[in-house]
Amino acid sequence: MGRQRKRVVTSDAPPHSRRDERPSAFNRKEKKKKTDIGKVFINISIGLCIFSLIWFFYALYMRSSLSKRVVTLHPSPRVLDANSTTAKVSSERFWGSYRPQVYFGMKTRSPRSILTGMMWMRQFSNSDMNLRHTCEQGDHLQGYGWLMHDGLTFGVQEIRDNDFTLTTEFVKRIGGDHGGDWTWRITAKQHSSAPQPPVISLMFYAAADTQGSLHTHMEERNRLASITGFSEELGNFKITFRKPVTGELSSPKYASYNYLQTLSPGLEKLTDIVKLSLNRRFVYSPPSGEKRHYIGVDTYKPHHHQNQQKHADPRKEGDFVVHQVTVQTPFQIEVLFESGSFTNRPNQLVGSIMTQELEKRKAEFNLKFEKIFGLESKGFSQTHIKFAKAALSNMLGGMGYFYGESVVQSVYNEYPLLYPEGALFTAVPSRSFFPRGFLWDEGFHQLLLSKWDPQLTREAIGHWFDLMNIEGWIPREQILGDEARSKVPAEFIVQRNENANPPTLFLALQELIEQLTSRSDEAVSKPTLPFLRRLFPRLKTWFEWYNTTQTGPKPNSYRWRGRDKDTNLYLNPKTLTSGLDDYPRASHPSADERHVDLHCWMALSSGIMASIAQLLGEPHEDYKLQHNVLTDNNLLDDLHWSEQLHAYSDYGNHTQNVSLQREKVYVPPGQPRHQFPVARLVRSVRRAPKLQYVNALGYVSLFPFLLQILQPDSSKLEHILRDMRDPNKLWTPFGLRSLSKTDPLYMERNTEHDPPYWRGPVWININYLAVRALYHYGNTEGPYQEKAAALYKELRTNIINNVYSQYVETGYVWEQYSDSTGRGQGSHPFTGWSSLTVLMMAEHY
């Protein structure tokens, strides 16, 4: 018991294999096979891991590399030399009224310029604070703008405030190594309607932009007689403030004086610093009049919160000096700037000497204006000619010199980046509302300015192209420097590198080429050829950027990127990149869209590229081939002609059955309504979209005609001319409306807070292109020549008469005009492309 018995193995049972016995050959092969397969899997896994790591680090490297491309400048030599705007190279243009965002001010074309400017306010008014400095529509001035300005040496501006008018004049005198001297003259006169002569405070100032120094020199206890200073660009200089006098008699005028000397943390803070320094403790006591307390600059004490630290880097602050003169109208004051290096000046540019210089420059301006535009010979009245001179002068006086960094972003950047610092010399659309550079506006600006001063146009275009990155992208809105950025809502500051703008600079280049070929022996045109040669490498990249980033779904089709994606809030998602903002496009943005206006811009651009390349002896065949393809009217019809609309049209995922409806917000019974969200206007889609032509008749439909892509014998031209002249569609007594009255979106809001913009009003830039095209077809043999010629005369007359009459009535040239009344509307003054009225008057196309 307890002991285990041994098992008895019979002879029939198979013997157990022993552990020390060797496996059969078959088993050995199976085991080896399994081992080999395992090794293969291990090796594959290791290989995949290594490959994944390599791919991961390569992807990181590529993403890092691609993310840097958006802020990497183009590698080709700059179009303009780095010193092209210095006093030694360009002394005539060194100083100028390059601060379009202020009513009156001057600076140099240098990155850290000494700024000069003027503020003013009316004393003893109903309002305690009516300080004027930056151009603001909210100031409700009766009118302001340059009456004469040659873009180089002088300017005359009139500012009509409520009960007085300020005339600001300046004259420059070249000499020395730092841009020479200049003098301002401010003349104040009361309006006849004013019950008594107003008392005005003028505040002249100088500010150093982080470098340079300013020193004050006093006389008579509190009168600032002059400022002396030094900066790298200006050397030593002196600004003298002369006493006010009573006009031509030059008899002394009683005035009270104040001054402020402090540091400014930024140029955009100048107005705030003056406002915070104002004090009512000063007494205005004229010899024959009552003593009254007035508001004057005193001591500036910046506001510091408890947790707010002072600037860690004092070098970011710059000297800021203000000279205040409080005086009763009428009066005249002169401010004289003298360069220390101008050692052989014949006399001071003041008094009668300045008057003589001004009259001389005015006479030269008038002669040049008539020689170029010939309005007298065309029979225009003197009041019409005065208006045309003001329109040109405001564009010249609206030239700005900006320096700073754009804020940009690409799809490879999680957050916006700072673009490399750069300079931009450009015209601006509106001194009050858009005092900065806009890419597609600038092409229209330079159409006018190139007639007056081709060198100015070459420099402006050169500055724009020198801001190009390695991809060929130019940020379409240039917000450079703190002053410019302070005028822009935050949502518009970041520029994205997939977004284009119409390449209108090709229009200005086309004008320069025509000047060169027709007047090649003239001095003003000779620099164009070497300029084009330096421009060409960047121009090629820019053109190629459009061809690779803005292509459409079909061969030779094009599509604007950057459409608004939040379709729930927009009646029709905007296409800001096209320049036509809320003009109706496909209701549901998609990659299937084809945009006819961009197709036409590329057709025009390819032809101009071919012309420039041929002029320079560069290969031009590919550009010519593309131009031939894109201007093929059969291709254009296949891609964009809508038989339903009998017009050219965009194509995309679209439905017309949309409207804005107030969204429903559920409020439980008994709950207060104010605790729940406000009901918004949102889009209601009553029928699903489908791929189709958009069928919105308006400016976009006209582009094959506007850019003269259509052949003169095209049957489509007949439809276009008929629609243009139809009062129920595009025709008005004031110009062509932007969207047909028959369109469902005509004058419809795009959002609750977004009134119609390009959905009916008359815009002058597109009307200029229409007049230009009618002139072309009216002078080209074809079946519609006579009709085009008749429409040309009628449309040109309507536009000129309305823009002129609104200027006389309101004191402004406007951004757009009502298609029902002709009244100016939108931002003002808008002496950007609305000034193209001058070219229509002169019949220069």
Image (cartoon, rainbow, N blue to C red):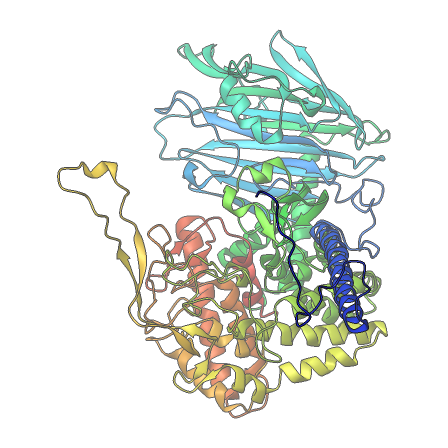
Which of the 4 image quadrants contains residue 781? bottom right
Q: Residue at x 46, y 66 (%)?
A: 589
Q: Give the residue furthest to the front.
A: 1
Image side of residue 389 versus residue 612, left or right:
left
The one of 584 and 391 positioned closer to us in this rendering: 584
Q: Position of residue 536 (x, y in %)?
A: 79, 65
The one of 58 and 209 positioned closer to us in this rendering: 58
Q: Position of residue 60 (x, y in %)?
A: 72, 51
Image side of residue 707 versus residue 580, left or right:
right
One can see residue 433 in this view = no
Q: Is residue 749 above or below residue 243?
A: below
Q: Is residue 774 above or below residue 56?
A: below
Count of numbered marks: 0
Q: Is residue 781 above or below residue 336?
A: below
Q: Residue at x 56, y 70 (%)?
A: 559
Q: Position of residue 424 (x, y in %)?
A: 69, 47
Q: Give the residue furthest to the left.
A: 670
Q: Is residue 671 above or below residue 570?
A: above
Q: Which quarter of the figure is the C terminus placed in?
A: bottom right
Which of the 4 image quadrants contains residue 241? top right
Q: Residue at x 62, y 6 (%)?
A: 221
Q: Residue at x 66, y 69 (%)?
A: 13
Q: Position of residue 480 (x, y in %)?
A: 64, 42
One can see residue 637 in this view = yes
Q: Which quarter of the figure is the N terminus placed in?
A: top right
